[in-house]
Image (spheres, rainbow, N blue to C red):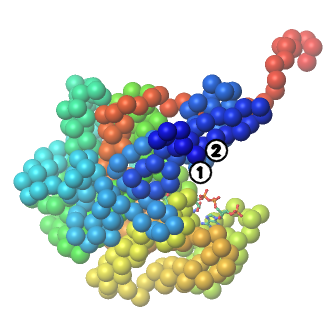
C-alpha cells in the first residue's frame, strides 16, 4: 500500500496496525524497515539472518536464484576473464575501474607496501611450529595495529586509504610467512619486479638455495583464485567486520575478526574441509556411502563445497573455478587426477540426485578451489589463508563504506527463553 509516495507494509497485530516503510534498492528484493517495531513493543526474529538486510551497500550484488554476482555492477565472469585481482581491489575500494594512470599508480603503491616490520618476524616466532596458519593470521593481522598507531583514526579518510593499501599489500607477505614458519624455512622477502600473484607464489615457494621461476599459468590461476574470493556481499565474515567496525574498533582488529569468522568450515574453512572430505572418501567406490550420509538428517555429515545460503543455483564463481582447475591440472600434466575425478563424480551425482536438486545444493566457490590449490602444491591448512588474502579488499571496502557513511553500533536483541525473575537461594537452602 502507499502513504503518498512512500510504500508501506501494514502489520496488523493484537489491536494495533503498524505501518512499516518499504524501501527499494537498485537491484534485488525490497526491504521492510522494521525500526519502528521496538517502540511498539516488538522485535523481529530471524536466527541466521536469512531474511534480514543488515545494511545498505553499493559494493556487491548477488542474485542467488539467477546465479549472478556483480562487483560495482560488473559481472564476475567478465572480471575473471578481462580484469585482474589488483584492478578488482581498486574497483571495490573506489567504485569505478581505474584508467591506465590510476591503475599504474595503485599497483606501484601496493608493491611499495608489501614488506612488513621486521619485528613481526619475532612476533610470528612466538607461535609453536605446528600452529595452524589461520591462528597465526588471526594474531598477526590483529597485531598490525601495534605497528601503525599513528594512522588509526577511523574518521580520517587518508588513514583509512593508507590502511586499505597496507592490508592489501601485506596479506600475501604475512600469508607466505605463516607457511614458511610452519615449514621451518627462511622467510622470503617480497620483490617489486613481480606481479601480485607471482610475488605471493615466490614468497611461498622460493628458497635461498636456487632461483625460483613462477609459472605464468599458475600465477594467472592464483590471481583468478584471489579475484574470485575478493568480495561477496554481507557474508558471515564481512558481517563480522562490519559489526566490529560499528564499535569504532581499529581496522586491523576488524579484519582480524573477519579472519577468525572465515575460519569456520561452514564458511571459508570449507575449501580445506572439501579436500579433507575427499581424502576421507578415499576412493570413488566409497562415494555412494558418503552421499547417503549427506542425505541422512540424523548424520551431521555434509558434502563440503556444496550448498550456499544465497546461491540456490550454480555459484558463478564455481563455474570459473572449474575452468581454471582444468587449465592448471592440464598445465601441470595431472589432468588425470584421482582427486579431481572423485570431485567430478561427486558433482555429477549432486547435480542429478533428487535430494540435492530439491534442496538446490550446487557446488560453491570452495568446491574446486581446493583441488587447484592442492595441485599447485599448497598444503590444505593454507587454503583458508588464501581465501582470507583474497577477501581482504572486500572486507576493507565494506568497513570503509560503513565508517565513511552514517552507521550505528550493531546491537541485535533476542527472544528471551530463560527463567522469569526469581529470588536468590542461600547456599544453606540449596
Ligand atoms: C562460503 O555467505 C557467503 O557468501 C559465503 C561465501 C563467501 O564467498 O563469503 O560464498 C563462501 O562460505 C561458501 C559456503 C561454503 N560452505 C560449505 O561448502 C559447507 C557445506 N555447506 C553447508 O554447510 C551449507 O550449505 C551452508 C552452511 C553453506 C548453507 O547452509 P544454510 O543456508 O544455513 O542452509 P541449511 O543448512 O539450512 O541447508 C538447507 C538444507 C538442510 O536440510 P533440511 O534441514 O532442510 O532438511 O540443505 C541441507 C541441510 O541439511 N544441506 C546439506 C548441505 N548444505 C545444506 N546437506 C548435505 N550437504 C550439504 N553441503
Q: Callout 1: 10 Å neighbours few (<14), some, many (20+)?
A: few
Would residue 240 be visible to someone looking at this image? no
Tell me which residue sits at (60%, 70%) in the image. Answer: 360
Tell me which residue sits at (24%, 27%) in the image. Answer: 156
CB under 8 Å between callouts 1 and 2? yes
From this view, report whether residue 371 is shown above or below residue 192. below
Q: According to the image, label 2 marks what residue?
A: 46
From this view, report whether residue 379 is shown above or below residue 350. above
State the residue lying farthest toward the right: 429
Callout 1: CB less than 8 Å from ligand 1: yes
x, y percent for residue 125: 34, 41
State the residue lying farthest toward the left: 101
Q: According to the image, label 1 marks what residue?
A: 50
x, y percent for residue 238: 43, 46
Quarter of the image where ligand 1 sits = bottom right
The kind of secondary structure element at disc 2 is loop
Tell me which residue sits at (54%, 62%) in the image. Answer: 308
Callout 2: CB less than 8 Å from ligand 1: no
x, y percent for residue 50: 59, 51
Residue placed most toward the observer, 366 or 416: 416
Residue placed most toward the observer, 237 or 211: 237
Left or right of residue 356, residue 122 in this image: left
Would residue 361 be visible to someone looking at this image? yes
Q: Quadrant of the C terminus?
A: top right
x, y percent for residue 339: 48, 79
Amino acid at each position: 500500500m502507499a502513504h503518498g509516495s512512500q510504500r508501506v507494509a501494514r502489520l496488523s497485530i493484537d489491536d494495533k496496525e503498524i505501518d512499516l516503510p518499504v524501501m527499494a534498492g537498485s537491484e534485488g528484493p525490497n526491504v521492510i524497515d522494521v525500526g519502528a517495531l521496538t517502540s511498539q513493543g516488538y522485535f523481529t526474529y530471524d536466527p541466521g539472518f536469512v531474511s534480514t538486510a543488515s545494511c545498505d551497500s553499493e559494493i556487491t550484488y548477488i542474485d542467488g536464484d539467477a546465479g549472478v554476482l556483480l562487483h560495482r555492477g560488473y559481472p564476475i565472469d567478465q572480471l575473471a576473464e578481462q580484469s585482474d585481482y589488483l584492478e578488482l581491489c581498486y574497483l571495490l575500494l573506489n567504485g569505478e575501474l581505474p584508467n591506465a594512470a590510476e591503475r599504474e599508480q595503485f599497483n606501484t603503491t601496493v608493491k611499495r607496501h608489501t614488506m612488513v616490520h621486521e619485528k613481526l618476524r619475532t612476533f610470528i616466532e612466538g607461535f609453536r611450529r605446528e600452529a595452524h596458519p589461520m591462528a597465526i593470521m588471526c594474531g598477526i593481522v590483529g597485531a598490525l595495529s601495534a605497528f601503525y598507531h599513528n594512522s588509526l583514526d577511523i574518521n580520517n579518510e587518508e588513514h583509512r586509504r593508507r590502511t586499505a593499501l597496507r592490508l592489501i599489500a601485506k596479506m600475501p607477505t604475512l600469508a607466505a610467512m605463516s607457511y614458511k614458519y610452519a615449514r621451518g624455512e627462511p622467510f622470503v622477502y617480497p620483490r617489486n619486479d613481480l606481479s601480485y600473484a607471482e610475488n605471493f607464489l615466490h614468497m611461498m615457494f622460493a628458497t635461498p638455495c636456487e632461483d625460483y621461476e613462477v609459472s605464468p599459468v599458475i600465477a594467472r590461476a592464483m590471481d583468478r583464485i584471489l579475484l574470485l574470493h575478493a568480495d561477496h556481499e554481507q557474508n558471515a565474515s564481512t558481517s563480522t567486520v562490519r559489526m566490529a567496525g560499528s564499535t569504532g574498533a581499529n581496522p586491523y582488529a576488524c579484519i582480524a575478526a573477519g579472519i577468525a569468522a572465515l575460519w569456520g568450515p561452514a564458511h571459508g574453512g570449507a575449501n580445506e574441509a572439501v579436500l579433507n572430505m575427499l581424502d576421507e572418501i578415499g576412493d570413488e567406490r566409497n562415494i555412494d556411502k558418503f552421499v547417503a550420509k549427506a542425505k541422512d538428517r540424523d548424520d551431521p555429515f555434509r558434502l563440503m563445497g556444496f550448498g550456499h545460503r544465497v546461491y540456490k543455483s550454480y555459484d558463478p564463481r564455481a563455474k570459473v573455478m572449474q575452468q581454471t582447475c582444468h587449465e592448471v591440472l592440464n598445465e601441470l600434466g595431472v589432468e588425470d587426477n584421482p582427486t579431481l575425478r572423485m570431485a567430478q563424480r561427486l558433482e555429477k551425482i549432486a547435480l542429478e540426485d533428487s535430494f540435492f536438486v530439491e534442496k538446490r545444493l550446487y557446488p560453491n566457490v570452495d568446491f574446486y578451489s581446493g583441488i587447484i590449490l592442492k595441485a599447485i602444491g599448497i598444503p590444505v591448512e593454507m587454503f583458508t589463508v588464501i581465501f582470507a588474502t583474497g577477501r581482504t579488499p572486500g572486507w576493507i571496502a565494506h568497513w570503509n563504506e560503513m565508517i565513511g557513511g552514517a552507521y550505528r553500533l550493531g546491537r541485535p536483541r533476542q527472544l528471551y527463553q530463560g527463567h522469569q525473575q526469581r529470588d536468590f537461594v542461600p547456599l544453606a537452602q540449596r
